[in-house]
Image: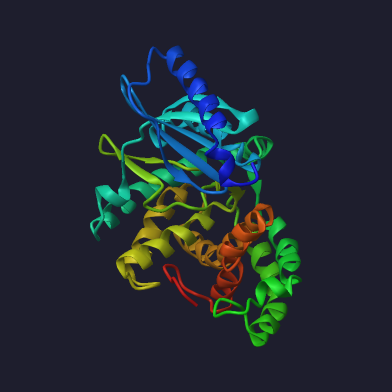
């Protein structure tokens, strides 16, 4: 797929509708109303399909996101309570069909009461990561992006060489002074990655976009969805995006007690691997390396996008690197 237009063509939509109808028939279901297209971006599109047993959702992704269907299939087998029920998957076309996962956390708990949901959810998500750590090679074989610690320093050096991308001609761009500081920080970043790698926490599945728009509440439990940004990386890198979005949405003090309580809730299951003191130290290292990893994930993503779309999102790289240089605490939204 080269553009969102490909996902709005009548012939493509007709082909998809026929595929959905055939897959639903295999489950004894039928389409009972108009199909809607509530999500349309360059990287993916989603269709809402009313059926004889409630709504189901179809998703198509760009080719590099084709791993999401097989990954969701694996999660549905191993952790069915933590992901949407999968009805069908076709990896060759990066298509999948799932049942309604519930109510988005963003709507189920739109105010600060949402923090109690995260305090319950984060340990369960950590348990999923612990369970999948021995299967990292299997995840990579599915096509999940490799952003393990050893990959990050050379990738950062490659990104730093793209001066035009970093020195955007707007407030999001890096100044010459920041670029110089970033060059000086490269050896230190390599050292941070090596130290974190020595902490004994194995790489695992990392959602990398875990926020209240990608979590659903179903029967009083939490379902994690939209694994299209997932990678194999240090699992603690998850906290960067999650706590950043929480800090932004609810005005929670960056690095404050509420943020640290959520960090500690996430770390609790990992006490089977290391002491609490060691985990807190590792999480502090991951705060820095994860900030860079998220920026580099955007860097890789924009390489695939059409020029105009890539330009729209290209500020994510300098933005993340400025947060790194500022040594921003967990929950910080801006440099």
Q: Nearer the viewer, residue 315 or 307?
A: 307
The residue lying at 63 percent from left, 40 percent from top is 136
Q: Is residue 23 left or right of residue 182?
A: left
Q: Is residue 82 left or right of residue 320?
A: left
* Quarter residue 322 falls in: bottom right
- Residue at (56% x, 76% y) in the render: 172
Q: Quadrant of the N terminus?
A: top right
Name above or below for residue 100 compared with residue 245: above
Q: Is residue 242 above or below residue 10?
A: below
Q: Is residue 204 visible?
A: no
Q: Residue at x 62, y 79 (%)?
A: 169
| Outermost residue toward the front in this view | 10
Q: Residue drawn at (39%, 12%), measured in percent from left and top?
A: 28
Q: Is residue 197 left or right of residue 115?
A: right
Task: Looking at the picture, tell me which residue is in the foreground, 318 or 155.
Answer: 318
Q: Nearer the viewer, residue 208 or 5?
A: 5
Q: How is the image coloured?
A: rainbow
Give x and y (percent) for residue 6. 59, 40
Query: Is residue 100 visible to the viewer in this orientation of the structure?
Result: yes
| Percent x, y of residue 111 | 24, 59
Residue 123: percent from left, percent from top:
39, 48
Q: Position of residue 45 (x, y in %)?
A: 50, 41
């Amino acid at each position: 797929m080269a553009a969102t237009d490909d996902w709005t063509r009548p012939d493509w939509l007709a082909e998809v509708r026929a595929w959905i109808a055939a897959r639903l028939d295999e489950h004894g279901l039928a389409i009972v109303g108009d199909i809607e297209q509530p999500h349309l971006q360059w990287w993916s599109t989603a269709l809402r399909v009313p059926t004889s047993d409630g709504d189901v959702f179809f998703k198509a992704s760009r080719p590099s996101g084709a791993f999401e269907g097989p990954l969701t299939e694996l999660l549905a087998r191993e952790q069915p309570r933590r992901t949407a029920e999968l009805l069908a998957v076709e990896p060759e076309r990066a298509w999948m069909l799932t049942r309604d996962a519930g109510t988005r956390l963003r709507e189920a708990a739109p105010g600060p009461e949402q923090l109690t949901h995260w305090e319950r959810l984060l340990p369960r998500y950590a348990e999923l990561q612990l369970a999948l750590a021995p299967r990292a090679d299997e995840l990579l074989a599915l096509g999940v992006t490799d952003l393990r610690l050893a990959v990050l320093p050379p990738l950062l050096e490659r990104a730093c060489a793209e001066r035009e991308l970093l020195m955007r001609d707007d407030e999001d761009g890096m100044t010459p002074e920041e670029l110089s500081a970033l060059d000086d920080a490269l050896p230190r970043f390599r050292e941070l990655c090596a130290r974190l790698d020595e902490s004994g926490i194995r790489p695992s599945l990392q959602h990398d976009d875990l926020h209240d728009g990608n979590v659903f509440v179903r029967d009083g439990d939490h379902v994690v969805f939209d694994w299209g940004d997932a990678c194999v990386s240090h699992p603690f890198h998850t906290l960067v995006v999650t706590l950043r979005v929480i800090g932004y949405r609810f005005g929670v003090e960056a690095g404050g007690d509420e943020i640290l309580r959520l960090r500690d809730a996430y770390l609790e299951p990992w006490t089977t691997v290391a002491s609490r003191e060691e985990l807190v130290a590792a999480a502090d290292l991951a705060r820095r390396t994860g900030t860079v990893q998220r920026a580099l994930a955007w860097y890789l993503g924009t390489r695939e996008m059409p020029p105009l779309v890539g330009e729209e999102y290209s500020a994510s790289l300098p933005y993340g690197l400025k947060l790194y240089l500022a040594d921003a605490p967990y929950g910080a939204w801006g440099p």
